[in-house]
Image (cartoon, rainbow, N blue to C red):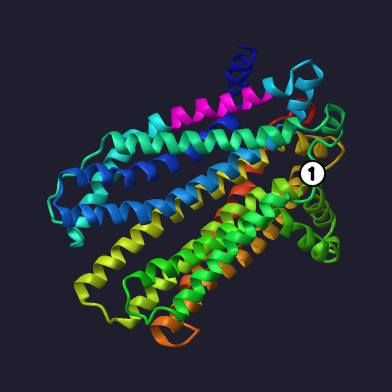
């Protein structure tokens, strides 16, 4: 009962965290319900059409599921870690670790249910649009009636709720197992090494991505229907693997950049210090950058290579191209929303820190320069590892389809993806920081 009251009270008094969690789950649930609705539609289709819809829902929806689950876990973990001092104060006031854990899990459950309920209406229209598109591209009979029913709602709600509960449970365990005194003393500082299980999972996922690349180059001849599916999985798996490694990657990167950043002035010195002591929190921002850059670049270049090869009949090629652009568009849009959402949530959570900096003499312009420097480092690191993820798909697919590891396609596609990533990252960094500047320094520095 106490945990339930604390959960609802926390949601009322932490609107930023609530909105960030809601946005992540809402967009994730919408994607899941949209593709799951194909399973509702197949109930009235002929056997061949039903098979096509099942494959589409399983393959495309399956990879969307992996990305949505991972992004939701990352966002909720970041938001819970930001509240470590609050959890420590609750423990010092007499709350037990189990009560705090139930409060965090209860909050996540409430947000997940609200997000799933809100996602139903847009998912209905998105599902209809997807079925119409499949009909227009010849993948299924034109005019097939789209259905949206129990399968879509139950899968979307169930998976979102499951992801939220798992993320909240893991995050709560990380927060509550620390001693009260240590948590209060180390508020905002987290230099613990990356967990062994996370490192093992990252290694397995990265190896799987590289395996997809090797299979693409060595097993397929370049004409099999499964080539694009296997090749595309390489970039997705590699991006997730690098994202899992991001907390461990920031340590060596911070050490390598320490000297150059110090020469950049006060903002550079503070950025170097933050990379060292805030590695876990800043790594949360890297996740959507890596996912967006890797998946968008890998899939777009793979389709460009396919277009240049031109071995498939025109109608089939156009159909595949349209569907690929729809899929990459939906996933890239989700990653872009997550990027902005994560950055805003991370920076709004540092309102107190920025207020204290202003109280000791920093001007708003200096705080913004600090945030801009941090954002520049993070976007550079994120683009680097996102690009490496894309290589796992682009090079093997180019070898399989053209015999050359370097595709002939223009570099303009890659530069466009990078430009969008930079604009989204730096724009959300500076915009969120500017919003925190509107709060008076005394109020922000004392209340957070």
User: Magenta-highlighted stretch: main secondary structure?
Assistant: helix
Q: Position of residue 83 (x, y in %)?
A: 71, 32
Rendered-image quadrant of the C terminus: top right
Asked if residue 390 is positioned above or below residue 199 in the image, the reply reads below
Q: In this rendering, would 47 be left or right of 73? A: left
Check disc 1 and report the residue beneath it: 190
Find residue 4 and report its image quarter.
top right
Q: Does 106 appear in magenta?
A: yes
Q: How many marks?
A: 1
**Quick check: can you spot residue 266?**
yes
Find residue 305 and report its image quarter.
bottom left
Asked if residue 227 is positioned above or below residue 248 in the image, the reply reads below
Q: Residues within 10 Å of mark 1 (few under 14, many from 20)?
A: some
Q: Position of residue 36 (x, y in %)?
A: 32, 44
Q: Position of residue 58 (x, y in %)?
A: 35, 52
Please tell me which residue is depicted at 48% across the width and 31% down the height of the picture: 112
Q: Nearer the viewer, residue 20 or 6?
A: 6
Q: Secondary structure at mark 1?
A: loop
Asked if residue 365 is positioned above or below residue 355 in the image, the reply reads below
Q: In this rendering, would 65 be left or right of 429? A: left
Please tell me which residue is depicted at 12% across the width and 51% down the height of the picture: 143
Q: Does 359 appear in magenta?
A: no
Q: Nearer the viewer, residue 260 or 27?
A: 27
Q: In this rendering, would 375 be left or right of 388? A: right
Q: Residue furthest bottom?
A: 403
Magenta span: 100-115
Please tell me which residue is depicted at 51% across the width and 76% down the height of the picture: 214
């Amino acid at each position: 009962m106490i945990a339930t009251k604390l959960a609802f009270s926390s949601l009322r008094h932490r609107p930023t965290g609530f909105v960030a969690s809601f946005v992540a789950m809402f967009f994730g649930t919408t994607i899941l319900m949209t593709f799951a609705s194909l399973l509702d539609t197949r109930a009235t289709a002929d056997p061949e059409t039903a098979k096509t819809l099942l494959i589409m829902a399983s393959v495309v929806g399956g990879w969307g599921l992996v990305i949505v689950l991972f992004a939701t876990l990352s966002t909720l973990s970041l938001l819970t870690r930001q509240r470590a001092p609050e959890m420590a104060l609750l423990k010092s006031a007499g709350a037990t670790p189990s009560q705090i854990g139930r409060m965090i899990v209860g909050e996540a459950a409430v947000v997940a249910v609200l997000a799933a309920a809100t996602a139903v209406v847009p998912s209905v229209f998105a599902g209809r649009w997807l079925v119409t598109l499949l009909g227009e591209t010849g993948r299924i009979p034109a005019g097939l009636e789209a259905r949206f029913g129990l399968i879509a709602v139950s899968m979307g709600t169930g998976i979102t709720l499951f992801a939220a509960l798992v993320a909240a449970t893991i995050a709560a365990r990380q927060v509550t197992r620390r001693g009260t005194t240590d948590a209060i003393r180390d508020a905002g500082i987290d230099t613990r090494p990356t967990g062994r299980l996370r490192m093992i999972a990252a290694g397995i996922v990265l190896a799987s991505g590289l395996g997809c690349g090797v299979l693409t180059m060595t097993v397929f001849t370049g004409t099999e229907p499964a080539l694009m599916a296997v090749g595309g999985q390489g970039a997705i798996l590699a991006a997730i693997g690098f994202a899992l490694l991001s907390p461990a990657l920031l340590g060596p990167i911070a050490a390598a950049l320490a000297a150059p950043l110090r020469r950049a002035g006060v903002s550079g010195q503070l950025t170097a210090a933050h990379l060292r002591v805030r590695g876990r929190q800043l790594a949360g921002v890297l996740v959507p950058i890596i996912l967006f850059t890797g998946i968008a670049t890998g899939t777009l270049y793979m389709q460009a290579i396919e277009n240049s090869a031109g071995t498939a009949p025109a109608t089939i090629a156009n159909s595949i191209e349209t569907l690929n652009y729809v899929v990459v568009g939906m996933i890239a849009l989700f990653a872009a929303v997550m990027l902005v959402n994560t950055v805003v949530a991370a920076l709004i959570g540092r309102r107190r820190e920025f207020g204290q900096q202003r109280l000791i003499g920093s001007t708003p312009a200096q705080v913004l320069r600090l945030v801009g420097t941090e954002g520049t480092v993070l976007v550079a690191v994120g683009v680097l590892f996102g690009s490496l993820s894309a290589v796992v798909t682009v090079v093997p697919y180019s070898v399989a389809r053209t015999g050359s590891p370097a595709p002939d396609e223009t570099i303009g596609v890659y530069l466009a993806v990078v430009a969008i990533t930079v604009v989204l990252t730096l724009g959300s960094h500076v915009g969120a920081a500017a919003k925190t500047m509107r709060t008076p320094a005394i109020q922000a520095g004392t209340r957070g």
